[in-house]
Image: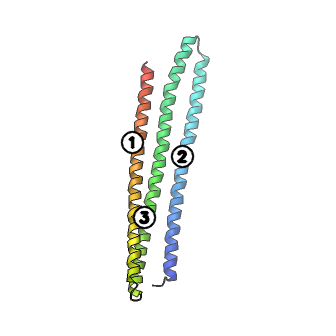
Amino acid sequence: MYVTPEQIQASTKANMEAMLSLATSQFAAFEKFATLNANAVKAAFEDSLANARTLVSVKDVQELVNLQSSFAQPTLEKAIAYSKSVYEMASQTNTTFTKATEGRVTEWNENFVALLDKATKNAPVGTDVAVSAAKQMFAAANSAYDNFTKVSKQATEIAEANVAAATETVKGLAKSKKTA
């Protein structure tokens, strides 16, 4: 029932690999987000320059009003696309983190059950009740974790559906204003 140095070393190595994997995925997500922001700022700057050049050539008030209206639609569409991209990146990063966490929890569960089984084999007579109680508590904790995971996934799906619906609503409003 004793833990050997090799087991400690293997566990430490597995935990370090898991942490490095998460750090790598977080850095990749940060890099994607920084690139997205840089591209958005560059596009906004280029659009502003183009709009300023166009505004300089305006000859009357009516043309100015028409131009300002025409500037709004592409800006709104780009803002929607940007928001959607940010949400997708966050969702992908969350999925990666969740999968890694679930994998580690599964491994820890298996190790804990193996430890309890070893403890049961080597335990003095009469301690089987305590070991059984520990197993039941562990099973209840796993059940609660599974329920929490399911609820979290459902909440994520609902949030994704709401984002998609809101995006479509904004696009519809923008199109209706454009035709008006």
Which circle marks residue 33 in the picture?
2
Q: Residue at x 41, y 39 (%)?
A: 164
Q: CA distance from mark 3 to mark 1?
A: 27 Å
Question: Which image quadrant: the C terminus?
Answer: top left
Q: Residue at x 39, y 47 (%)?
A: 157
Is label 2 or label 1 in front? 1
Q: Is residue 61 left or right of residue 107?
A: right
Residue type beneath disc 2: Phe
Q: Residue at x 53, y 55 (%)?
A: 26
Q: Residue at x 52, y 64 (%)?
A: 19
Q: Where residue 90 appears, x then y in whole percent?
A: 49, 48
Q: CA distance from mark 2 to mark 1?
A: 22 Å
Q: Residue furthest bottom?
A: 125
Residue to which mark 1 is pinned: 161
Q: Where residue 122 appears, x then y in whole percent?
A: 41, 87
Question: Which image quadrant: the N terminus?
Answer: bottom left
Residue type beneath disc 1: Ala
